[in-house]
Image: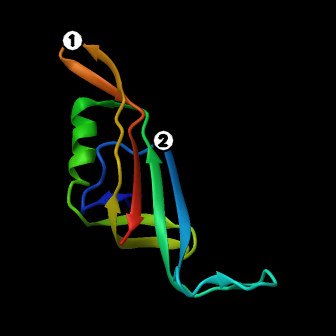
């Protein structure tokens, strides 16, 4: 069983760092503190955010990973720490910095690709 799938594809390389954050989304207007400091909270959803970083990648590998995330929204299958099983949810990706590492002949190596996926 694959650990990850982006848009139905197993990644060309697995990330060296993988972190899932469980996010509570609150209603900005109805979640307020009272004058005595108590929080009145209106949670509207619980979502996931996944941060990943890769070590050295060949040009074809980084291209494949980035292309698997090029849609506005796409399905991601990942191990979820809260549910204790693999989940498939719809995510979008933010900025995707990809530092250049070194050129070796016609091959360019990239090191430190970082992506943050946020559940829709």
Residue 105, which numbered label? 1
Residue with the most extreme left position:
106
Determine crowd level at label 2: few under 14, some 14-19, many 20+ residues with C-alpha closer than 10 A. Answer: few
> Nearer the N terminus, badge 2 or badge 1?
2
Residue 3, which numbered label? none
Q: Quadrant of residue 87?
A: bottom left
Name the quadrant of the N terminus. bottom left
Residue placed at 37% from the left, 66% from the top? 77
Residue with the most extreme front position:
35
Q: Residue 65, relative to residue 28: is it above or below? A: above
Residue with the most extreme right position:
36
Name the quadrant of the C terminus. bottom left
How far apart are the alpha carbons under marks 2 and 1? Answer: 25 Å
Q: Secondary structure at mark 1?
A: loop
Coordinates of residue 92 in the picture (x, y in percent): 32, 63
Residue 16, which numbered label? 2
Q: Nearer the viewer, residue 100 or 107?
A: 100
Coordinates of residue 73 in the picture (x, y in percent): 26, 66
Determine crowd level at label 1: few under 14, some 14-19, many 20+ residues with C-alpha closer than 10 A. Answer: few
């Amino acid at each position: 069983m694959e650990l990850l799938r982006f848009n139905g594809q197993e990644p060309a390389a697995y990330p060296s760092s993988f972190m899932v954050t469980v996010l509570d989304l609150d209603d900005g207007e109805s979640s307020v503190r009272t004058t005595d400091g108590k929080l009145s909270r209106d949670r509207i959803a619980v979502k996931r955010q996944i941060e990943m970083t890769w070590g050295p990648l060949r040009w074809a590998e980084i291209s494949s990973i980035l292309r698997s995330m090029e849609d506005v929204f796409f399905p991601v299958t990942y191990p979820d720490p809260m549910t204790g099983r693999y989940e498939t949810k719809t995510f979008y990706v933010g900025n995707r910095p990809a530092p250049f590492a070194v050129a070796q002949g016609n091959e360019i190596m990239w090191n430190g690709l970082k992506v943050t996926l946020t559940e829709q």
